Image (cartoon, rainbow, N blue to C red):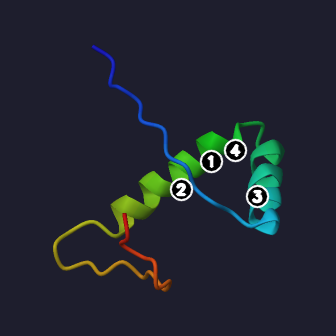
């Protein structure tokens, strides 16, 4: 059975959005695929109980 896919909303500045779209276009993939792979890689890199995420905003961790 296929995994259920969850949608996530991320707010980007216009500059960040343009860079993401250019990056994806240059590689002929969707910008959502690039974002998903970046999140997966980030989580893998910072996995583990001793890992502290390098989050810098005051809103970090807020739901």
Circle nearer the viewer, 3 or 2: 3
User: Is label 2 in a helix, a strand or a loop?
Assistant: helix
From the image, which quarter does the N terminus lie in? top left
Q: Which mark is residue 10?
A: none
What distance separates the C-alpha of mark 3 from that of mark 1? Answer: 12 Å
Badge 3 marks a residue whose secondary structure is helix
**First in sequence: mark 3 or mark 2?**
3
Q: Nearer the viewer, residue 27 or 16?
A: 16
Image location (x, y in percent) of residue 28: 78, 37
Cβ atoms under marks 1 and 2 closer than 8 Å: yes
Circle 2 Cα neighbour tier, 10 Å, few/some/many (<14 / 14–19 / ≥20): few
- What residue would you read off at disc 3? 17
Indicate the secondary structure of the residue bearing disc 4: helix
Q: Position of residue 27 (x, y in %)?
A: 76, 43
For disc 2, the marked residue is: 38
11 shown above or below 51: above
- Residue bearing the label numbered 4: 31
Is 38 situated left or right of 29 in this image?
Answer: left
Residue 1 in the image: above or below residue 29 = above
How many numbered dots are placed on residues in this image? Answer: 4
Q: CA distance from mark 2 to mark 4?
A: 11 Å
Which of these two is toward me, 36 or 5? Answer: 5
Measured as percent of width and height from the top left, residue 4 is found at 35, 26
Viewer-side label of 3, 4: 3
Which sits earlier in the primary sequence, circle 2 or circle 4? 4
Assess whether mark 4 and mark 1 are in contact (beta carbons under 8 angstroms). Answer: yes
- Residue 34, numbered circle: 1
Relative horizontal placement of residue 25, taking residue 62 as reference (left or right): right
Marks 3 and 2 sit apart, C-alpha to C-alpha, by 14 Å
Along the horizontal axis of the image, is 51 left or right of 15? left
Q: Residue at x 83, y 58 (%)?
A: 18
Mark 4 nearby-residue class (10 Å; few <14, some 14–19, many ≥20): some
């Amino acid at each position: 059975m296929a995994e259920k896919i969850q949608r996530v909303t991320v707010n980007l500045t216009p500059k960040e959005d343009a860079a993401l779209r250019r990056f994806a276009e240059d590689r002929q993939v969707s910008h959502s695929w690039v974002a998903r792979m970046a999140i997966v890689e980030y989580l893998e890199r910072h996995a583990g109980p001793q890992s502290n995420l390098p989050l810098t905003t005051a809103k970090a961790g807020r739901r």
